[in-house]
Image: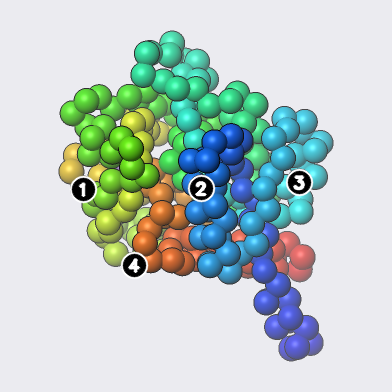
Amino acid sequence: MERNRNEKAVRKPVIALAAGVPDSEIRRRKLRMYVEAIEKAGGEPHTLPLSTDSEALTKAMSDVDGLLITGGRDIDPRMYGEEPDSAVELEMQERVDRDAACIKLAKKSGMPVLAICYGMQILNVVEGGTLYQDMGPEIVPLHRESGRDYIEHDVAIESGTFLERIVGSQRIRVRSSHHQAVKKVGTGLVVSARCARGEIIEAVEREGAFCLGVQWHPERHERQPDPLIVAFVEAASSWARQRSG
Ligand code: MN
């Protein structure tokens, strides 16, 4: 009845955090920012195990309502058919494989996905796309500042995209910390934002699903909850209601 429906609506959506191993104080602090940003947006964060066992992952994913892939190190370029150059600092392969498997599970079930920074890159690679292994000394300083968590820059959002609908604007200021970027866009993904200075791809989305990759860090934005994370948590909530009928 009405009351039941309301009770269901207030159950917090559980957000799977597909993160790297927090093996340093910096990584622990960065992980806390995701946890807090999800909580402030009304979600309940749940850290995914670091497992590549497909049964364990299927089980873990069946207990959650949304998939958030956090930032991380670099993906082995051999996954997109290139030899690594000297600039790459590889993420643990176990993590990369786990995240790739989760993206595929979410695609199959229609579970909402928010893929941040490294997360956007693995989303793109899973769909057959490629990356710039390093944007180079002229571009990297516009997107990453050494010794700091972020540098700010503007992003131009493509009109008519899902991202534009969520953000409600064609230009936003974001906090950025990356030295790689999407080169060839993966199959089934479309570019939804670029850096306002230049052509660097800053966001991709899958048509017909809440599956969004952003190169920036909404969880590091000063004003929380961030609208993007709110929209994602709400999508997870409505997907969970749909799933449970
Ligand atoms: Mn950037």
Residue toward you, 67 or 151: 151
The amino acid sitting under disc 3 is Ala
Report the residue marked by disc 1.
196
The amino acid sitting under disc 2 is Arg
Q: Earlier in the sequence, mark 2 or mark 1?
A: 2
Question: Judging from the image, what secondary structure is the residue with disc 2 in?
Answer: helix
The circle on residue 60 is 3
Find out whether the residues at labels 2 and 1 contact each other: C-beta distance under 8 Å.
no
Crowd rating for badge 2 (residues with CA inside 10 Å; few <14, some 14–19, many 20+): few
Find out whether the residues at labels 4 and 3 contact each other: C-beta distance under 8 Å.
no
Tell me: residue 239, above or below residue 150: below
Question: Judging from the image, what secondary structure is the residue with disc 4 in?
Answer: loop
Q: Earlier in the sequence, mark 4 or mark 3?
A: 3
Q: Earlier in the sequence, mark 4 or mark 2?
A: 2
Residue toward you, 10 or 80: 10
The amino acid sitting under disc 1 is Ala
Position of the C terminus, as image quadrant, is bottom right
Q: Residue furthest bottom?
A: 2
Task: Point out the frontmost of discs 4 and 3.
Answer: 3
Which of the 4 image quadrants contains residue 171? bottom left
Query: Marks 1/4: CA distance?
Result: 17 Å
Query: Marks 4/2: CA distance?
Result: 30 Å
Residue toward you, 99 or 242: 99
Q: Earlier in the sequence, mark 1 or mark 4?
A: 4
Report the residue marked by disc 2.
29
Which of the 4 image quadrants contains residue 148? top left
Report the residue marked by disc 4.
168
